Image (cartoon, rainbow, N blue to C red):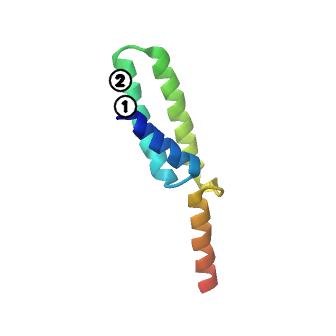
Amino acid sequence: MLPPVEGLIGLLLLIGLKTRWALIASSLLMLVLTFGSAMVQNWAAAGTQLMYALVFSALLFLRRYNSWSVDGCWNKEQEDRIQKGS
C-alpha cells in the first residue's frame, strides 16, 4: 500500500500538479512514518524522515514561486484571462 502512495505523491510533486495537496499529503505521510520509526526506536530513520519533513515544509512555504510547474502554468493562464477581461 505504501509504495503506490509514495509513487503517486512523488509523481504529482515531480510534474507540479496539485502541488499544495501533494506537499500536505507527503508531510502527513512523513509524520506517520516518523511516529512509526520512533515507536520502534529507529532513530537514524526518524532523523532522516524529519529532514524530509523540513524540506517539505520549506517547499510548501515557497510554493508561490513555483512558476514552472503545471499548477504555475494554469495559474498564469487564469491571471492572464482575468487581466484581459478587465
Q: Where residue 1 sits in the image (x, y, percent)?
A: 34, 35
**Left or right: residue 38 compared with residue 75:** left
Q: Which residue is mark 2?
A: 36
Residue 17 shows in the view: yes
Q: Where residue 2 sits in the image (x, y, percent)?
A: 38, 33
Q: Residues within 10 Å of mark 2 (few under 14, many from 20)?
A: some
Q: Which mark is residue 32?
A: 1
Q: Secondary structure at mark 1?
A: helix
**Looking at the rendering, which quadrant does residue 81 occupy?**
bottom right
Residue found at the far bottom of this picture:
86
The residue shown at (41%, 26%) is 34
**Looking at the rendering, which quadrant does residue 42 occupy?**
top left
Q: Where residue 5 sits in the image (x, y, percent)?
A: 40, 40
Instruction: Identify which amino acid the numbered label 2 is placed on.
Output: Gly
The residue shown at (50%, 34%) is 53
Instruction: Identify which amino acid the numbered label 1 is placed on.
Output: Val
User: Cβ–Cβ below 8 Å for labels 2 and 1?
Assistant: yes
Residue 86 shows in the view: no
The residue shown at (61%, 63%) is 73
Q: Where residue 30 sits in the image (x, y, percent)?
A: 43, 33
**Looking at the rendering, which quadrant does residue 8 occupy?**
top left
Q: Is residue 26 above or below residue 20?
A: above
Q: Secondary structure at mark 2?
A: helix
**Left or right: residue 71 compared with residue 65:** left
The residue shown at (56%, 52%) is 16
| Whole-number angstrom distance, CA of label 2 to CA of label 1 | 6 Å
Q: Quadrant of the C terminus?
A: bottom right
